[in-house]
Amino acid sequence: MARVWASASIREGAGRVHGGHAFRVADRLGGHPRVRLGNHRVALFAAGSPTAGSRTKAVLHALLIGVAKYKHAGMDLRGPPNDVALMEKLLANKKGRLFARVTVQSLIDSEATRAAVAKALAKLAAATKPCDLAMVYFSGHALREEEVQKAETLTLVLNDYTPAGRGRMNHRELIAALAQGKAAQQLVVLDF
């Protein structure tokens, strides 16, 4: 299984930058992502390879998560709901062009708790077939944590986050949840 990793930057709330650069990768999973953006970080990683005939009958299953309002004080952002709306619009244009169908579930602010995200990931994984693309997009806060083995973990900070450890999901958990499905291609975009 091929693995692709790229990190770059993005200006908060600059939707045209998102559509112009970062999300072209979804159209070219087999190629190498080329992402050149502004000051805030974006992480892209994907796994899998297209199956024969996948372009004609593939379904894009997308879970879009945007957290601007947090339960924990002092963490609120402005851009994530706008980012999700722009991504919804971008993905809607892919129906009939790259995919036979596009299904999108969005979780915004208070809807984006750890439990709700885990449930939505399970639903997305269960819906996929081998020729499909499973995609997760996250816009909000994230933590970079260095582990004992000097490996870096990216952790999504969800709406129900607490400094004590609630409301978090790391990138390995996200990939493992997607791997429960049958999609030969998975794409995760973290905009933090």
Image (cartoon, rainbow, N blue to C red):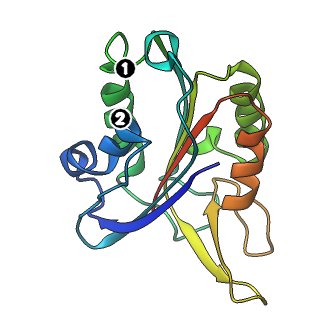
Q: Nearer the viewer, residue 2 or 134?
A: 2
Q: What separation in Å lies between label 2 and label 1 (alpha carbons)? A: 8 Å
Q: What's the mark number on residue 27?
A: 2
Q: CB of mark 2 within 8 Å of CB of mark 1?
A: yes
Percent across and percent down for residue 103 are: 53, 18
> The disc labelled 1 sits on which kind of residue?
Leu
In the depicted structure, whether residue 165 falls above or below residue 32: below
Quadrant hosting residue 173: bottom right
Q: Nearer the viewer, residue 190 or 36?
A: 36
Give me the residue at 71% from left, 40% from top. Answer: 178
Give me the residue at 29% from left, 58% from top. Answer: 34
Q: Residue furthest front?
A: 52
In the depicted structure, whether residue 34 falls above or below residue 115: below
Quadrant hosting residue 110: top right
Q: In this image, 139 relative to 23: left or right? A: right
Read off the residue under disc 1. 98
Q: Nearer the viewer, residue 8 or 99?
A: 99
